Amino acid sequence: MVDFISPQVLQLLIAAQADHPDAPEASYTAAFTQLLISVDRGQLSQSFTEKRFAAGEVVIYEGDEGDSLFLVWSGRVVIVKGDLNSPFIVAYRITGEIFGEMAVLENQPRSASVIALEETRLWELRRARFEQLLSEQPAIGRGFMELLSARLRYMTAVRTTGDLSEKRLNRQVTALKSENQRLEELQRLRQETTDLIIHDLRNPLTAMAISLKMMTLVLPENILQANHELFDIAQASAQRMQRLVDSLLEVSRMETGEARFDMQRFNLGPILHDVVQRNSILARKGIQIDADIPFDLPVVADREKIERVLVNLLDNALKYTLENGHIWVQAGQQADKTWVSISDSGPGVPVEERERIFERFTQGSGEKLKRRGFGLGLAYCRLAVERHGGRIWVQDGPNGLGSRFTFTLPEATPPPRQPDLSPPPTRSAPG
């Protein structure tokens, strides 16, 4: 029996996680995990046995006898059934989640195989010790049953939803009489898919929060202080994920005209400086970010939405700027408008792509422009800026290299539409 799957199968399993729906059980997993780590540290270390696995290594095999469950301490695993050369994916488990839980309740063979997708640390809890913990800590038993109940309800809901969706789809297909009706249905289904994505993205956010909480509970204070920069990066990444979820929701609302704008007068300068500082910690090694931003930049706008525009544009620049590259953030005022530009030394945007990249779920088609993502950041920027009565565009960066994204905001509350605005004069780039 082999201990590792092939590299080809491993890559397929890793890639498939992005499209695989996760059970919405994070709150139950979090509660159960919190109960476990609330046990006395010495008692906890006696209860669990630490095991380490390399990427592609098989943790347990379907059909094997087993009497223990596992807690994922770091890394991630995939639960599969069938031939390991072409397995059927059941679920993924990440930091803070458990698997193999049925083995501590019944004397039955393992119902599935589990494979480590990367270097993974697991804590193993055997049945005898689990039963002892239940007698010593009744709350753990309640948390465990809540977790199992959540998973059972989810599987039942999936089956019921699948049956109802199939019946509804059959009725809808029969009812479609024209090409126009089919297009309207596709649009509605796309919106439902977006709503599902928004829901499913909340699970990894919860998992990141669980991971950070677990570390702060078990690591000594001196280690936490020595690694505070790592915690800052983790928290910034979690916030970035939250912005993606919010962008999905806001883009849909702005397209349908349902989004609300809280217009107020404020100074954009300090917000720009803060966005640059917060995103600098996520910059890859060697990327230099320079800012030429006046402190006094009064605008009338929705503060939260404009801040997200700034974050999206800077995140886009970081995404396409290679190591040892350069990013410039500039701002100023011209006539009755305030302008902001973010330039990078990346591959640039071809002229034929400069309008299309602001569309929803769109990315550059050139090989150099391909990056992972949903293509929502720039779509959000255009919708938000235009709702403010401003304009956003992209042109060549400094000295004809890279890209320069620029947007404008009116000095006062704008009318629904404004005449076309020409790009502001190019200010000399720092350095």
Image: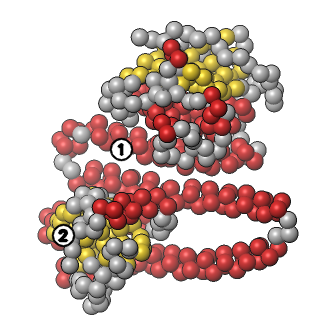
Give the amino acid at mark 1. Ala
Q: Relative to the observer, which residue lies in front, 263 or 79?
A: 79
The spot of residue 93 in percent (x, y) is: 36, 65
Return the mark for residue 331.
none
Counting residues from the N terminus, which is met first, the one under dot 1 or under dot 2? 2
The spot of residue 3 in percent (x, y) is: 21, 71
Badge 2 marks a residue whose secondary structure is: strand
Q: Relative to the observer, which residue lies in front, 372 or 259?
A: 372
Look at the picture and state if 121 lies above or below 410: below
The spot of residue 143 in percent (x, y) is: 37, 73
Look at the picture and state if 115 lies above or below 377: below
On screen, residue 346 versus residue 177, left or right, reads: left
Q: Residue at x 20, y 38 (%)?
A: 226
Q: Judge the density around disc 1: few (<14), some (14-19), many (≥20) Cα neighbours within 10 Å.
A: some
Q: Relative to the observer, which residue lies in front, 109 or 153?
A: 109
Q: Judge the density around disc 2: few (<14), some (14-19), many (≥20) Cα neighbours within 10 Å.
A: some
Q: How far apart are marks 1 and 2 (CA)?
A: 27 Å
On screen, residue 353 versus residue 236, left or right, reads: right
Q: Which residue is drawn at 34% across and 38% down?
A: 232
Does the CB distance between marks 1 and 2 fall below 8 Å? no
Q: Relative to the observer, which residue lies in front, 221 or 100?
A: 100
Q: Mark 2 points at which residue?
A: 48
Q: Which colour scheme is used?
A: secondary structure
* Direction right: furthest residue: 177
- In this rendering, does residue 31 appear at all? no
Q: Residue at x 45, y 23 (%)?
A: 345
Q: How many numbered discs?
A: 2
> What is the quadrant of the C terminus in the image?
top left
Give the amino acid at mark 2. Phe
Q: Name the residue under label 1.
A: 234
